[in-house]
């Protein structure tokens, strides 16, 4: 149940965030998405619009667009890579695990491994005002899934 050592995580944090901010993955518009949700942080002006296309109950395509700080946009980019081929339930579990990481909870080795590159964001916890930036896309995911279910689509 160890977290990464801070010097190790700081280097990983810088690499992952800068890489995904400079070259975001899946920063595309999805045609006719099944789930679309626009999340905005009025305090800093960050915005993430999440789009998911589902097939056989799994995320077939994941895309986003938006603007904001390196942390919010990198988090959205890494999230998109992590969501592909997951069921909505698996996506919600991943979101819950990531949120717990950001809130400072200790995660099991399996949970940390399951996060993949998302584990690099634990470095953000040293900057409490930036945690909301890292969680912006995840809030869009959670709200988008909830809206999709309320609409009775599943």
Image: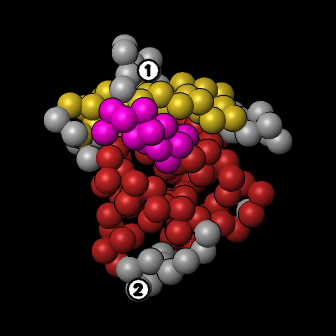
| Along the line of sight, the residue nearer the viewer: 78 or 52 | 52
Q: In the drawing, what numbered circle is on residue 1?
A: 2
Q: Which residue is mark 1?
A: 28
| Along the line of sight, the residue nearer the viewer: 3 or 85 | 85
| Along the line of sight, the residue nearer the viewer: 106 or 15 | 106
Which residue is most to the left?
56
Which residue is most to the top?
31
Q: Where is residue 124 drawn, in percent x and y? A: 64, 60
Q: Is residue 143 covered in magenta?
A: yes
| Residue at point 36%, 71% (across, down) | 111
| Main SS, magenta residues | helix
Q: Is residue 19 visible?
A: no
- Please indicate whether residue 129 sits to the left or right of residue 53 in the image: right
| Residue at point 55%, 77% (across, down) | 105
Q: Quadrant of residue 34?
A: top left
Q: Is residue 112 visible?
A: yes
- Please indicate whether residue 13 sits to the left or right of residue 116 in the image: right
| Residue at point 36%, 51% (across, down) | 91
The magenta span reads 140-154
- Please indicate whether residue 132 sits to the left or right of residue 64 in the image: right
């Amino acid at each position: 149940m160890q977290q990464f050592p801070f010097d190790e995580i700081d280097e990983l944090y810088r690499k992952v965030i800068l890489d995904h901010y400079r070259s975001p993955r899946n920063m595309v518009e999805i045609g006719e998405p099944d789930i679309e949700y626009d999340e905005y942080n009025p305090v800093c002006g960050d915005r993430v619009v999440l789009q998911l296309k589902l097939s056989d109950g799994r995320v077939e395509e994941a895309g986003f667009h938006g603007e904001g700080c390196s942390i919010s946009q990198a988090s959205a980019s890494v999230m998109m890579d992590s969501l592909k081929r997951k069921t909505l339930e698996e996506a919600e579990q991943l979101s819950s695990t990531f949120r717990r990481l950001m809130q400072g909870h200790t995660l099991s080795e399996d949970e940390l491994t399951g996060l993949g590159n998302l584990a690099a964001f634990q470095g953000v916890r040293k900057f409490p005002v930036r945690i909301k930036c890292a969680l912006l896309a995840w809030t869009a995911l959670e709200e988008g899934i909830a809206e999709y279910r309320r609409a009775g689509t599943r």
